[in-house]
Amino acid sequence: MKFKKTHNIDELSLDLQGKEIVIGGWIEDLRKLGKLTFLTIRDVTGLAQVIVKDEGLVPEDITRQSVVLVKGVIQSTKARDFQYEIKADAVDILTKAIHPLPIDPIGRLESNIDNRLNARALDLRNQRVAAIFKIRHYVLQSLRKTLTEKRFIEITTPKIIGSASEGGANLFSLEYFGKKAYLAQSPQLYKEQLTIGLERVFEISSFYRAEKSHTGRHLSEFTSIDIEAAFFDYTDVMDVLEELVVSVFKDVKENCQTELKTLERTLDIPRQPFERVTYSQILKELADAGITLNFGDDLLDSHLKIVGEKHPGLFFLVDWPMSLKPFYIHEKDDDVKLSRSFDLQFGHLELSSGGRRLHDPAKIKARLLEQGLNPADFEDHLQAFDWGMPPHSGWGMGLDRLMTVIIGTDNVREVVLYPRDPDRLSP
Ligand code: AMO
């Protein structure tokens, strides 16, 4: 590099007229008008127009998306789209982009999602795509801020584990120094144990599910936001979830105006309180639609589609049958067939599920056996229940699914940089 970048593009304005600056970025467009060359240069903060009067400064064969440093002086401009322009004194070509590029990086020519994912790094030069990941950054910041304010402590639990956290299905297994190991499906068991020492914990990490699903909402590797809180009942963690989701929407609306504008997206702050609909009520609604389910039947995609038409926004689905819930979920006191658990839905899409946990080890062992699981496989976990396990509740929410709701897409691959699904293991 012949000279050093002095400014991000969003730091430049006509106030700096006459001053020499250096910007660094990618050539988004270049036009030659007689002896003049006009370059538009983009860095992550914005777009600037550069005018090159000296023909020798830019080689004939320079390409779009090449990386350059431009040293020049800020001056006024007649261009409609810019408040100022940079008159170049020197252009240092750092990397030349080789054409043809696999996709049109600025998105004028639409590419299908597979081609875009195959060239994801280049795809991010499309401002609509970059906007999604800038928003994702703010969503993560907002989640951490709100949970920290609520005195949750961020934890990191192992992703290589010796026994299943969510029961036997959907586990990726691997060889671990001659032993069988698994990729964690969730931090469930660890987050529960950690309420002993830290009371309120949260984790935002990748988890793994060997699901052969080809849908817009399933990935083999997804990011989960998990919480667990001692002395909280399931309704208390529902309140945390509701507040968290609403503050994410508010923070994105406030901090990501440019990105939302780029995506032509208006974000409505969800109305509170979120509706609470019982499982039995859903069965009635389905019966009205001509679908007869028995108590204990799971809600399939086709059922949730109908549910989503009646309840298109955010709502809690509560009072699930115990038989449909994992071994760690607590029953209701007044009706042991029902669980103290919930799902947070956005129409037909499940965003989160959670509940009150059993903290009596004898009950957990009984539930493991009931579900065909072997308590011996959960020995490490179960021993913690003899060390002073507080009553506790929590939930897990798919960050990627939450992002699809914020962005307004039905494909989770749009909001994950390098998605993993049964057909995709690279890049
Ligand atoms: P559950 O299995 O319902 O619950 O997962 C919680 C949330 O994680 C997201 N999710 C996924 N997102 C993308 N691709 C997948 N394959 C995928 N699987 C799950 C969903 C889902 O609602 N331990 C419990 C949570 C708890 O009770 O604390 C659990 O894992 O948004």
Image (spheres, rainbow, N blue to C red):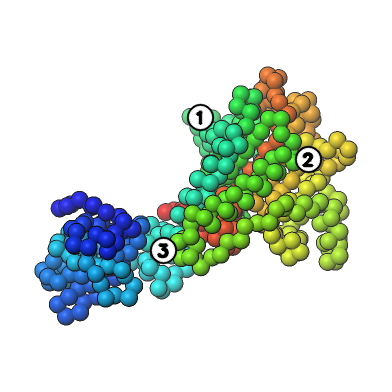
Amino acid type, callout 1: Gly
Relative placement, left or right, of 7 versus 304 is left
Picture residue at 41% right of the left edge, 63% below the top: 127
Q: Which residue is mark 1?
A: 178
Residues under numbered marks 1 and 3 in contact, where contact means CB atoms less than 8 Å apart: no
At 74% from the left edge and 61% from the top edge, which residue is drawn?
311
Q: Earlier in the sequence, mark 2 or mark 3?
A: 3
Quarter where residue 294 is shown: bottom right
Label 1, label 3: how many angstroms apart (C-alpha)?
Answer: 47 Å
Kindly state the secondary structure of the residue where label 2 is placed.
loop
Q: Residue furthest right?
A: 334
Of the numbered discs 1 and 3, the one sitting upstream in the chain is 3
Q: Based on the displayed image, in which of its 4 quarters is residue 163 positioned?
A: top right
Alpha-carbon span between mark 2 and mark 3: 44 Å
Dot 2 corresponds to which residue? 340
Count the marks. Answer: 3
Mark 2 Cα-neighbour bin, 10 Å: few <14, some 14–19, many ≥20: many
Answer above or below: position of 342 versus 72: above
Q: Are marks 2 and 1 in contact (CB under 8 Å)?
A: no
Residue type at tag 3:
Gln
Mark 2 or 1, closer to the camera: 2
Q: Quadrant of the C terminus?
A: bottom left
Q: Secondary structure at mark 3?
A: helix
Visible in this render: residue 3? yes
Numbered circle sitting on residue 273: none
